């Protein structure tokens, strides 16, 4: 596309009455034929394409973002203060199965195998890690020090083991362990112990007086000195450290035997997440990731997407992609649970957008949700999971989690993802140590600014330099390279790894 033909505004659907600015548009700019910017319009923000009378619909993605609080003349900057939020879609009688894209219409994967670590059960690993899981935060300091010593003193003897990871978290004690919703954090820790990247080696460190006891995490036959160590049983610091190092050494000897082998895509589970989104996210990064998701699903892989508050306003589009009433009902149940959870806290889903989202042009949660859903691609939703559950099917899976990056990450890890693809508009150094995270940004300016922290820019989709399919192929290739261990995303190169914040909707005592 020639430079002079590059559009200054991007309209998604013909019926839309707002479009977003590809770059900063100073007042007076001819934004499109017959459309002059009436005031300065920041990049990624919305411009009114025609006169929008007070009280009428403001449309983007063909969806009502809100209702105009005042008359909005054509060429105006349309920001969050000018819209009244619509009601979220009703959860009753949502039609299902009305938009089931058949497999032949999905884009073909350009590779059908990858190199991973096969496990006795469940999906394969993308890394060969020793994971040391704490039952309770009280053990975290000890385990972090022990992990540093294991890295220094033991790991050099085990060249086939990638790393050792302290799986610490805020849960475990001082909590209402028998509250109905405690099942979520308990399930999360239980499933993290068995993460595919840990190769079936169980190493759990407890304190001795906590509420999250071994029997809540492990099977009876797994509770033995090979797998669990209780700090209150250790006689002072030196004996405590030595016991952890000895236990780690035995685990490392077994992990050292693991080798990568060529595996079908059906052995791969990945997660999609976005954070620090802007109004470009739904046009460039998320649909490109969705294209890669479609390629993976067609190849037999499992792809999770999540973040309840960011799909709630598009639930009707997701229900249409559920093949049966059962899957639709599971989807509705997760949405209803979250509606009630937010209501109990005195808020609704519009508590989600951040100041950065709004600075990036997202007016409200409806606009954010329309962009967020794009990362799921187009394939049917074959299963719906509650937070931290493990999938039982291959294909596209809706795994309900909070949208918070730092909470969604551990939930998806507990569901067994071997890799996460993370889309961002504003930029975040987010990363996970249990599974690699590939960062995809929505604008070229972001990639230019964080050139050595963002892995892929989808910004060319907005400027006409590239297409969603091209960026989708680029993401797909990087997923398989990173999963196979031949490339490292930036977050792993620098060791930018976040703490694991386990989702605990149950009371703390
Ligand atoms: Ca998020």
Image (cartoon, rainbow, N blue to C red):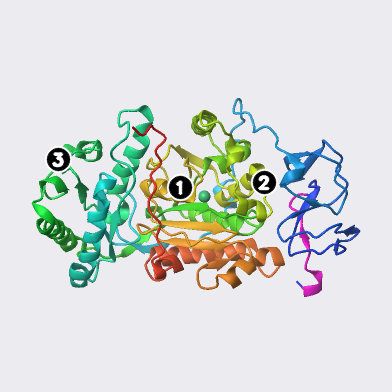
Q: Is residue 432 above or below residue 82?
A: below
Using residue 56 as the reference point, say whether residue 336 is left or right of it: left
For the image shown, how many numbered marks are present on the structure?
A: 3
Indicate which disc, 1 or 3, sits on the residue closer to the N terminus: 3
Quadrant in which the N terminus appears: bottom right
Mark 1 and mark 3: Cα distance apart in space? 31 Å
Instruction: Identify the residue position indicated by label 1 in the image.
Output: 408
- The answer to the question of whether label 2 and label 1 lie on touching residues, with beta carbons closer than 8 A, is no
Mark 2 and mark 1: Cα distance apart in space? 20 Å
Viewer-nearest of labels 2 and 3? 2
Residue at image point 64% right, 64% down:
443
**Magenta highlight range:** 2-13
Helix, strand or loop under label 2: helix
Using residue 61 as the reference point, say whether residue 237 is left or right of it: left
Helix, strand or loop under label 3: helix
The quarter of the picture where residue 189 lies is top left
Residue at image point 74% right, 44% down:
81
Q: Nearer the viewer, residue 406 or 462?
A: 406
Helix, strand or loop under label 1: helix
Instruction: Identify the residue position indicated by label 2 in the image.
Output: 367
Q: Nearer the viewer, residue 275 or 347?
A: 347
Residue 364 % position (x, y): 66, 44
Residue 191 % position (x, y): 31, 44
Q: Nearer the viewer, residue 236 or 326?
A: 236
Residue 176 % position (x, y): 32, 31
Indicate which disc, 2 or 1, sits on the residue closer to the N terminus: 2
Some atom of ligand 1 lies within 8 Å of the CB belonging to the residue at label 1: yes
- The answer to the question of whether label 1 and label 3 lie on touching residues, with beta carbons closer than 8 A, is no
Residue 110 visible, this angle? no
Instruction: Identify the residue position indicated by label 3 in the image.
Output: 221
Mark 2 and mark 3: Cα distance apart in space? 50 Å
């Amino acid at each position: 596309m020639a430079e002079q033909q590059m559009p200054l505004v991007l309209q998604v659907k013909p019926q839309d009455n707002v479009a977003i600015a590809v770059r900063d548009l100073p007042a007076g700019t001819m934004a499109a034929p017959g459309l002059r910017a009436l005031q300065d319009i920041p990049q990624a923000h919305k411009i009114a394409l025609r006169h929008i009378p007070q009280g009428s619909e403001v449309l983007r993605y063909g969806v009502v973002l809100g209702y105009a609080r005042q008359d909005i003349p054509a060429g105006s900057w349309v920001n969050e203060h000018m819209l009244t939020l619509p009601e979220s879609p009703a959860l009753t009688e949502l039609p299902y199965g009305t938009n089931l894209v058949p497999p032949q219409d999905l884009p073909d994967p350009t590779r059908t195998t990858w190199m991973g670590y096969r496990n006795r059960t469940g999906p394969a690993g993308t890394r060969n890690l020793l994971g040391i899981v704490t039952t309770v935060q009280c053990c975290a300091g000890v385990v972090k020090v022990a992990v540093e010593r294991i890295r220094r003193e033991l790991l050099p003897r085990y060249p086939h083991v990638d790393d050792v990871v302290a799986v610490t978290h805020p849960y475990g004690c001082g909590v209402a362990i028998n509250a109905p919703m405690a099942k979520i954090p308990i399930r999360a820790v239980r499933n993290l112990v068995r993460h595919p990247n840990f190769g079936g080696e169980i190493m759990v460190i407890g304190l001795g007086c906590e509420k999250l006891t071994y029997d809540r995490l492990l099977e009876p036959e797994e509770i033995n000195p090979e797998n669990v160590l209780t700090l209150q049983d250790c006689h002072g610091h030196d004996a405590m450290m030595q016991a952890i190092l000895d236990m780690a050494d035995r685990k490392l000897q077994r992990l050292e035997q693991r080798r990568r082998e060529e595996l079908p895509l059906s052995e791969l589970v990945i997660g999609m997440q976005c954070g620090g989104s802007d109004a470009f996210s739904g046009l460039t990064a998320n649909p490109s990731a969705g294209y890669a998701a479609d390629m993976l699903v067609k190849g037999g892989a499992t792809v999770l997407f999540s973040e309840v508050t960011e799909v709630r306003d598009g639930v009707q589009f997701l229900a249409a992609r559920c093949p049966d009433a059962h899957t639709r009902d599971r989807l509705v149940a997760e949405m209803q649970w979250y509606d009630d959870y937010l209501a109990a806290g005195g808020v609704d889903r519009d508590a989600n957008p951040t100041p950065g989202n709004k600075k990036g042009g997202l007016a409200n949660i409806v606009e954010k949700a329309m962009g967020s859903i794009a990362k799921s691609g187009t394939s049917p939703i074959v299963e719906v999971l509650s937070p931290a559950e493990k999938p039982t099917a291959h294909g596209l899976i809706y795994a309900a989690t909070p949208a918070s990056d730092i909470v969604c990450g551990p939930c998806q890890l507990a569901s067994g993802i071997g890799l996460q693809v993370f889309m961002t508009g504003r930029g975040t150094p987010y990363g996970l140590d249990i599974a690699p995270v590939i960062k995809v940004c929505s604008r070229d300016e972001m990639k230019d600014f964080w050139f050595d922290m963002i892995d892929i820019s989808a910004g060319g989709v907005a400027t006409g330099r590239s297409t969603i399919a091209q960026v989708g192929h680029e993401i797909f290739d990087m997923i398989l390279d990173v999963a196979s261990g031949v490339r490292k995303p930036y977050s792993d190169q620098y060791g930018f790894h976040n703490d694991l914040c386990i989702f605990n909707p149950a009371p703390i005592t």
